[in-house]
Amino acid sequence: MGWVVLTIVVIILAIYRWGIANHEDDSLHVSDTEVAVVGEQVAVAKKLAAVDRWGKILTVIALVYGLALAGAYLYKGWVETNGPTFS
């Protein structure tokens, strides 16, 4: 259950990042009249950096957690089929 919740959080974070990235302006602003636009883009870049950092951390945790669950499931199945036989 925890892995599912963690994976859903990662997906929601990816969608949130996509929404923030839509407000990002990729053009270069060099005139003095566009200072406000540059400041806004700095704020967007900081938000993206924070979301990216948490996204990477949570993705790695979800991946490791999922692999551990899969390994435990496979090990349990192996033990049940190849367990000790007392005849």
Image (spheres, helix red, strand yellow):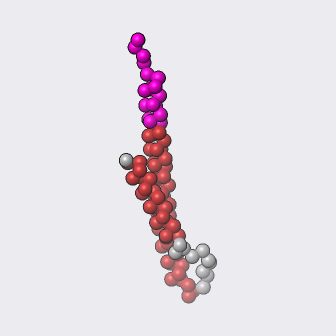
Range shown magenta: 71-87
Q: How many marks?
A: 0
Residue at 49% over, 77% down: 40
User: In terms of image quadrants, where is residue 77?
Assistant: top left
**Residue 37 in the image: above or below residue 82:** below
Most frequent secondary structure within the magenta stretch: helix
Residue at 49% over, 70% down: 20
User: Which residue, as the protein is rendered here, is positioned at the far bottom?
Assistant: 33
Q: Is residue 45 visible?
A: no
Position of residue 26 measured from the top left corner of the image (x, y, whole percent):
60, 74
User: Which residue, as the protein is rendered here, is positioned at the far top?
Assistant: 87
**Residue 25 in the image: above or below residue 56:** below
**Residue 37 in the image: above or below residue 57:** below
Position of residue 4 measured from the top left corner of the image (x, y, whole percent):
41, 50
User: Which residue, as the protein is rendered here, is positioned at the far front?
Assistant: 87
Residue at 42% over, 18% down: 84
- Which residue occupies the foreground of this view, 82 or 2? 82
On-image quarter of the C terminus:
top left
Position of residue 71 measured from the top left corner of the image (x, y, whole percent):
47, 36
Residue at 44% over, 35% down: 72
Position of residue 57 measured from the top left corner of the image (x, y, whole percent):
47, 53
Q: Is residue 80 visible?
A: yes
